[in-house]
Amino acid sequence: MSSGKVKAAQLWSKNKEDLTKQLAELKTELSQLRIQKIVSSGTKLTKIHDLRKSIARVLTVINANQRAQLRLFYKNKKYLPLDLRAKKTRAIRRRLSPEDASRVLEKTKKRQTHFPQRKFAVKAA
């Protein structure tokens, strides 16, 4: 490989085998550079930095593709894994569903029909 920086735009078009192969190449190159750094002091640290970032980019693309595949797999299933569900906030997740919130108990219905809200002609000042 030995090109250093990897552009994320080029990675999206590749399939999983190519990505894993590229990841392995980048990791071996990184290990060689780390060995060089120990042996001789005159190595470029920026190259190591670029390689680490490139590895991160490849891993990001691999994980994003994997999540997209999982989303397709679970699209019409009854339950969705926790890590694929919408995060939002804890309060929103705990909140009643609109259907449950709109439900009225039988006793409440009777109370509303027998004792409706009184209508007053004069408004309180």
Image (cartoon, helix red, strand yellow):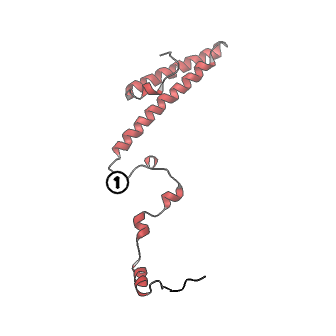
Relative to 119, is 68 on the left or the right? left
87 is higher (above) or lower (below) than 51: below
What is the x, y in percent for residue 113?
40, 84
What is the tally of numbered marks visible in this picture? 1
Query: In this view of the protein, which residue sits in the foreground, 97 or 55?
Result: 97
Q: Could you tell me which residue is drawn at 49 percent across and 50 percent down?
A: 87
Helix, strand or loop under label 1: loop
What is the x, y in percent for residue 50?
56, 22
Name the residue at the left extreme.
Answer: 76
Q: Could you tell me which residue is drawn at 41 percent across and 75 percent down?
A: 104
What is the x, y in percent for residue 114?
41, 87
111 is higher (above) or lower (below) than 101: below
Q: Quadrant of residue 18?
A: top left
Which residue type carries mark 1?
Lys
What is the x, y in percent for residue 61?
45, 32
The residue where tag 1 is placed is 78
93 is higher (above) or lower (below) than 110: above
Q: Could you tell me which residue is drawn at 39 percent across and 66 percent down?
A: 99
Q: Quadrant of the C terminus?
A: bottom right
Name the residue at the right extreme.
Answer: 41
Q: Residues within 10 Å of mark 1 (few under 14, many from 20)?
A: few
Query: In this view of the protein, which residue sits in the foreground, 123 or 58?
Result: 123
Q: Could you tell me which residue is drawn at 53 percent across and 18 percent down?
A: 4
